[in-house]
Amino acid sequence: MVDVRLEHLSAEFTHPSRGTVVAVRDVDLHVQSGELLTLLGPSGCGKTTVLRIIAGFQVPTAGRVFIDNQDVTSVLANRRDIGFVFQNYALFPHLTVQENVAYGLRVRRQSAADIVRNVEKVLQLVDLAGFGPRLPDELSGGQQQRVALARAVVIQPRVLLFDEPLSNLDAKLRVQMRSEIRELQRVLGITTVYVTHDQEEAMAISDRIAVMDQGRIAQCDTAEELYRRPASSFVASFLGRTNLLDASVVRRDGDRVILDMEGQCLSVEASAAFGAGDAVRAMIRPEAIGIGPAGEGLRATVVTRTYLGDKVEYVVRCASQDLHIVRFNPTESERFTPGSEVTISLPSDGVQLLPGN
Amino acid sequence: MIPRWITVAYFLYLASPIALLFIGSFGDLWLNSLLPTGITVKWYLDVAADPNFRRAFMASLFVAVMTSVACVAIGLPLAYAVFRTQSQRVRAAARVLYQLPVAMPALVLAFGFILVFSSDTLPWLGSIWLLVAGHIVLWLPYFLQTVVADMQRLGLRVLEDAAETLGSTPLQRFFHIVLPALRLSVLSGLIIVVALSIGEFQFSNLIAGFLNRTYPVVLLQAFYGATGFACAATVILLTLALIASFTGAFVARGAARLSVAGDER
Amino acid sequence: MTEMPSVRVEGASFSYPGGKAGVFDITIDIAPGELVVCIGPSGCGKTTLLKLITGLLPCSAGRVWLGGEDVTTASVRSRQCGIVFQSYALFPHMSVWENVAYPLRVRAVDRTERRRQAEAMLDTVGLRGYSERLPAALSGGQQQRVALARALVFKPRTLLLDEPLSALDAATRISMRDEIRRIQKQQNIASLLITHDRDEALSLADRVAVLRDGRLVQIAPPQELYDRPADAFVASFIGRTNLIDGRVVAPDAVDTAIGRIVTPAHAMPMGAAVRLLVRPERIEPSSTETGENVFAATVVHDRFFGASREIELSVGQGMLKIDTTVRGTIAHVHLPRQAVQFLPTH
């Protein structure tokens, strides 16, 4: 059982025109053994740098890296026993699939018979039995990705690292490959760190997600916790779509507060931090908002309606604010065309308050 | 930090003969010492005054310019044909053509020329036009390669399709799209051709007639005379080459700036 | 009298030399102002279809009409199609306005006039003030807008878009999607958009045409396509599915691996092998343990996607996928009878 621990990790670069750039600031992270943890964030948030530091491709400016409780901060990459899957697969073009996968075993001086057996086994695992003699060029993107995966796991690494492995695949293949990666990781039980900027991919694949923003970990938790109780508006809007509505607190009522939102009163759960008169931003998920024919309640006008088969997305204008609404499995009666007047209902549960500006 | 040392060492190795040539060309007296003594520009004036060198300089320029003209006239349509062809055979032939100057030394070409053009039916050996013809064979592939690569990088095919659907005639497409879009790679291809042509020695040495010897050919003779004179003559050749390569780099940078950021995904 | 379609493709075929996939016997009409989205997996022939309309490829059989005129043998130039290429195909050496004005230039419109029209079009696509830039200095989304302006400025008979959004990142893609729709409606021009993205097809199209192996499988408005797909291929290409094979045991029931499923009344003979389609979002977690089409279920996979969750359930001897916003444990599921539909088996 292997875990990965990062302590006070920082990394700086010298950029030719921008001077010193801090890519990673004081990151603490504990990846449990057997867990798949995803580093999620926009480009430039430092997620890949963290991954490369764990791999040993890059030396941190400060802080330490532990693999299996052993300080590996100054250990070279090839001594860390890690499997790395690259964004562009980085397959050796002159070697066959068999030889690509065998490479890690060859440099570990396994016997020829063992190599053949192990490669065979792992190619079967990634559904590429019989592809051994082919060259990478002759494979589709998804197949190349599987070879890269096989090459990374065949050496039975202590830790498996993925750097945006699916970004070169088309949407359908991406969905399929991510569940394959997840299955394989579960079967092998290898502690895994996975980097992506795609929130849906992160939610589909991870045990836990560390959302990164400007070199820091903004929040690290399960997808469900991050979605329901985001610590900041950054996390809220990065994971799923969200509405951030300006409102003010009218008064407290036990563990709830009464909000004034566009002249509408709304009672929501709130921590003690919010008191009467505070300006707040109420975070409401698009699927929590109801929409119905014009009547009593909060009036709005439909701006756009987007039909997506299993769901319909609306943008409605309510006073001065635009609201996103998602209706799953919509009924026939629930068809509101752009320009039509509707009534929306805001939920009393599932509203998260964040400090206002 | 080993790579840095190698870089420095290699640079010294590369630069020291050039530096020595440079010093020598301005040195007054250079006999048995490591470095010459005294500073003078007389060697340059001597070179400039020497009728042999003047003629050779003009011959070299003439050959380079004529080769360039031919490259545009023959090479551009050829490059376009190679780029547009669907046929695998034409592509294979083009690949062979690209490899030709590497596979076939100029010396071999020169012997071939001597055999063919010293006969009574084609008695053109010694003519400057034959020199130009030889240079075209030698340098056209470099030009083709540069231009075809640029056509592929630009996605010229789709640009032309786009222009056609927008209503332009084949002639308009050539002058509005193909030529302007390729102007930088044509220019950089020509600079390569000029640089190679001006420096070429092997072929010209064997083919050139006495009155139209090119600059490098005459240069060799200079080393039998005064060292300073030879150095100055060489530095002039070197300067031409440097100008060509700096212009080339400048043009390439311009081309990179122009390239549409469509391939960023 | 019905209005003449702006674009009519009738029985068009094309096969590539060497037997590579082409298109076979395709018939599509596009009405004035209508946006038809053509969708299919890669290699299904959708780009070939577009090239047949533009004339970049010749029809080996069939005919193409544009604006009521038979253009089957007409040149590319004379067809007057506005095309947005996947790579945008902006001319790298021309500024933004020169790109947009190019079709006017080859039509010999004088310089001040074409500048004026180009600027007006750039205004329409939201690029005022970018006239003098070179394409290389624009973002992907902006280049896309230039390409759109250039394709529309000469008032073409039809607008054809070849995977116009595939090179953009997810956020830009969604905003450009709405933008293309807005401009297309504003210009009221018959349009064909090629894509492999189902969200794009469903959200943009007046009608969606599904292509497979060079043949047109179904053409219908998005909702009809989703609710009444012609076959299993269309059903699963356009959305997530449960495809359940079974045998008819009653005029309104089918025996399947999941159990006996009550269906809308049908006319299939007893014992016939049938395939049922149930969309995952139509299946509901059930609070009661018995009732029509209520089955005991065990959760195998539970994937959380924020707004909804995708759950795979083991039911009877089979599996069901469901999409639900319901939170909490699931022990029973209910398949509403109306959510069950028959697909042809073959």
Image: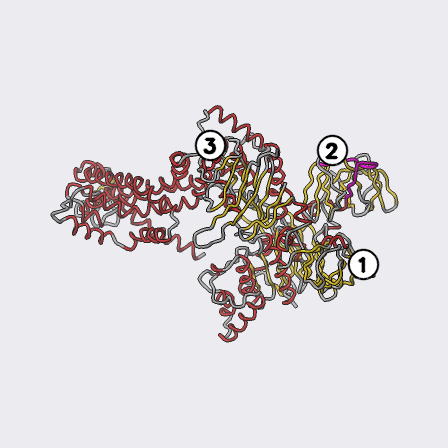
Q: Chain of mark 1?
A: C
Labels 2 and 1 share a subunit: no
Labels 1 and 3 share a subunit: yes
Nearer the observer: mark 2 or 3; the answer is 3
Instruction: Kindly identify the residue that appears in the image at 42 percent across and 40 percent down.
Output: B255
Q: Position of residue C62 (x, y in %)?
A: 50, 44
Look at the numbered disc 3 and give the secondary structure of its residue: helix
Q: Residues within 10 Å of mark 2 (few under 14, many from 20)?
A: few
Nearer the observer: mark 2 or 1; the answer is 1
Magenta-highlighted residues: A289-302
Q: Chain of mark 2?
A: A
Q: Is residue A44 visible?
A: no
Q: Residues within 10 Å of mark 3 (few under 14, many from 20)?
A: many
Q: Position of residue C300 (x, y in %)?
A: 72, 63
| Left or right side of C131 for A203 | right
Indicate the quadrant where residue C180 lies: top right
Q: Position of residue B53 (x, y in %)?
A: 19, 40
Residue on which the image places disc 2: A320
Question: What is the residue that sits farthest to the left in this orientation?
Answer: B120
**Camera-side residue of A243 and A127:** A127
C-alpha span from label 1 to label 3: 65 Å
Labels 2 and 3 share a subunit: no
Q: Chain of mark 3?
A: C
Residue on which the image places disc 1: C292
Q: Are marks 1 and 3 in contact (CB under 8 Å)?
A: no
- Scheme by which the image is coloured: secondary structure
Instruction: Kindly identify the residue that appears in the image at 43 percent across and 57 percent down.
Output: B2
| Label placed on residue C102 | 3
**Camera-side residue of A5 and A138:** A138
Q: Are marks 2 and 3 in contact (CB under 8 Å)?
A: no
Look at the numbered disc 2 and give the secondary structure of its residue: loop
The amino acid sitting under disc 1 is: Glu
